[in-house]
Image: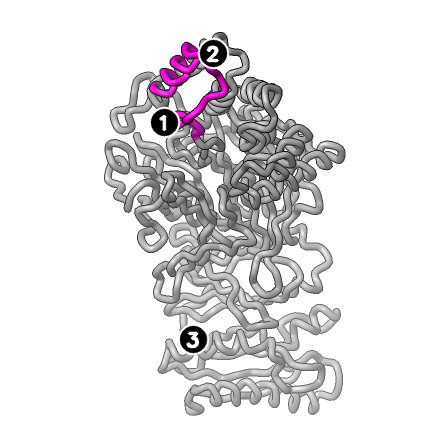
Amino acid sequence: MKRSNYFKLFFLFQFVILHSYFVPLFAQPPVMFSTTNSKAIKLFKEAQSYIGVDPKKVVELLKEAIEKDKNFLEAHAFLAEMYAYNSQFDKSVDEYNECFAINPNMMQNNYYYAGKVELKIGRYKEAKDHFSKYLASKSVSHKMDDEVAVLLKSCDFAIDQLQHPATFNPINMGPEINTSENEYFPTITADDQMFLFTRRITLPQTSRVTGLSFQEDFFYSTKENGKWTKAQSIGNMINTEANEGAPSLSPDGQYLFFVVCQDVNGYGLDRQGYGSCDIFVAKSAGNNKWSKAHNVGAPVNSKSWESQPSFSSDGKTLYFIRGIVDEEGKRKGDIYMAQIKDDGQWSNPTRLSNKINTPYDEESVFIHPDNQTLYFSSNGHVGMGGLDIYMSKRQADGEWGEPVNLGYPINTFNEENSLLVDSKGKLAYFASDRAGGFGGLDIYTFELDQKFKPENLTYMKGKVYDSKTKKPLAGNFELIDLETSKVIMESQSNAVTGEFLVCLPANKNYALNVSRPGYLFYSENFAMKEAKDISKPYLMDVPLQSIDTGLTVELKNIFFETAKYDLKDESKGELQKLIAFLNLNKTLKIELGGHTDNVGDKKMNITLSNNRAKSVYDYLIANGIDKERLTYKGYGDSKPVVPNDTPENRQRNRRTEFKVIAK
C-alpha cells in the first residue's frame, strides 16, 4: 500500500496531512562548535542563510563544511535533518550514525530524530536502540518521553508483525476501473452494485480555474452479471472544471458526500464555502443522475479544514476529519461526528474520544454499513510507523473500543490510508502504486482477515410505489430495534424511481415502517436473531395504499405470548407508529382486528382474538387517541390470508390488523 511521492506532492486537497517529523535544529547558530576550523564554520553559517530558500544549496554547503572537518558534529546533524526533509532517509540515517560515531554523548536529542527516520524506512531494531538511548540520556530535555514510549511499543509491534504476517493478496480491479492516470478514494453502496472513486486526469493545458495541470473528477462503475462495467464520469452536476475529492456514498446510494477546497479562485464556479476545505452533498436523482451539490453548511463546516466524510447507514450520522492548525502552524486532523436533528439541521460536531483520537493525526475515517465498526488511519497509535489503518468496534455503552492495528503487510512503514470494506465484510479496497499496475495509483481489492471483519449484515432492497397507479413514491423508512423500541435507521426511497436500500445488521430483531403523507403506512418484521442465513438480501417492493375506507393494514410487529393477549414490550415501536399515524390523520376512524390460526377451539380463538384486538384498543386510548375513533373485533380463524397447512402459514394467519372505517 505504498503511495507515490507525486500523490503526496500534487494531490490538491492534501487529504493525507503531511507533517514534518523534524524540528529545525539550527534556527540560531550555536555559541560553540565542535570544530575550530574557521572555514568549516563559515560554510555552516552560510548554509543556515539558505534555509527555506534553496534546500539544495544548504546540502552543498554542509558537504563542503564536512570536507573541511570530517568530525564537524553540527554539520553532520544538520545534513541529516536536510536529507530527512528531502525524503532521503537512508542518507539521513548515515549522517546521524556519523554523529554518534564522532561523539555519542553530544547532541543526544539526535537519538530521537534518528529513531524517527529509521521508523519511516522500517529499520525497527535500529530505531528501538536509538529511542532507548534517548530515554536513557541525562543530557536531553525529555519533552518527547511520552511519544518515545509509544514509538518503542511500535518498534516491538512491527518486529513481531514482520515475523507473523497476515494473509494479504491484493488484486488489481482491472481496466474497467484503473487507467494510466491515478485512481483512489473508492466508495461503494451496501448492495455492492455501484462503485465510485476519484480519478486524477492530466490536462492538455493548465486549468484556468485551479491553475493546475491536472483535474480530479469522480467516476463510477455498476455491476452487471457479477462484473464491473467500464467506469464513466459521474456527470457535470458533480464534476466541474475545479477539483472534487474524497467521495463517500451513503450505503443506500441516495446521497453523495464529497470535498471541495478553496484555491486561488475560491471554491470554483458557484460553490461557496467557509474557508479551506468544506464538505458538500448531492442527492440521487435516479438512473445514476445527481442533483446540484450544496455545502452541508455550519456547524459541520467551519473556517477549519473539513474532509474525508463517511455517512452512516442510520441515515443521520456523518463522520469526518477536521484539521485544525496549532500554534506552531501545523495542521492536526481529528475524527468528528455530527448528526441530523429532528428539525433537519446538523448538530454541533463532537470530537471522538481520546481512545480514537491522539495528539497526532487521524485520517480517512470510514463507518461500515453495520454502524458498529469504524476504520481509520492514524500515526498516533502503536503501529508500523507513519499512518497505519485501525479498526474499532462500538461497545455496549455506545463508546468506541480500543483500536486494533490491521497488521503487516496491510500496514507497513509507508503511509497507509483510505481503506474501504464492503457490506459483507469480505472484501476491502485500497489505492496503491505497487508494481504491475496500469500506471500511478490503481485501486486494488483483497479478502479481509476474519478478525478485522465488521458485524454480519444483510439488506432489504426494492421500490416504493402507489398500489393503484404504480407510480414510484418517496417513502420515509424507519428501522426500529424491537428490544429497545429505538429508531436505529431513517431513510427515504428515491423520489424519482422509488428505489430504496435498508441495511439490516444481524443479531437483532427489527420492525420496519414505511410511511408517506396521504397513505396508509406499511409494516414489516425482520427476525434477524433467528436468521440462519443472512447471505441473501431481502428483495421486496413496498406498495403504499392511498388512504380510503375499507382498506386494511397488517401490523406485523404486534406481539403476544402464545395463547395470551398481553402486549409484549416489542410491540411498542409499532404501536407508537400507529399513534403517530392517527395523530397526523385526525379525522380517521379505524377498526382493530384480531386473527388466529385454526388450531384449537373456535370459540376460544374468537375470544382470544377479540381480547388481543382490545389490548391494542386500550393501549391507543391510554396514549391519547379518542375512543370515538376506535372499534375492535376478534375474527378468530374466519379470515385466513393463507391456508393453515404449514407452521409458517399458521404463523402468518395469527395477526393484528387495522381497517379504515371512516375518513
Q: Where does label 2 land, which residue?
A: 63
* Rendering colour mode: one colour
Where is residue 78 shown, x and y percent of the image?
47, 22
**Residue type for callout 1:** Gln
Where is residue 149 shown, x and y percent of the image?
61, 43
Q: Secondary structure at mark 2?
A: helix
Front tag of 1 and 2: 2
- Give whichever of discs 1 and 2 has the lower sequence position: 2
- Residue sitting at 46 percent across and 77 percent down? 550
**Residue type for callout 2:** Lys
Tag on residue 581? 3
Alpha carbon of mark 2 to alpha carbon of mark 3: how far?
Answer: 81 Å
Label total for image = 3
**Foreground residue among 27 and 59:** 27
- Give whichever of discs 2 and 3 has the lower sequence position: 2
Q: Secondary structure at mark 1?
A: strand
Chain part drawn in magenta: 24-49
**Foreground residue among 214 and 302:** 302
Q: Where does label 1 land, which residue?
A: 215
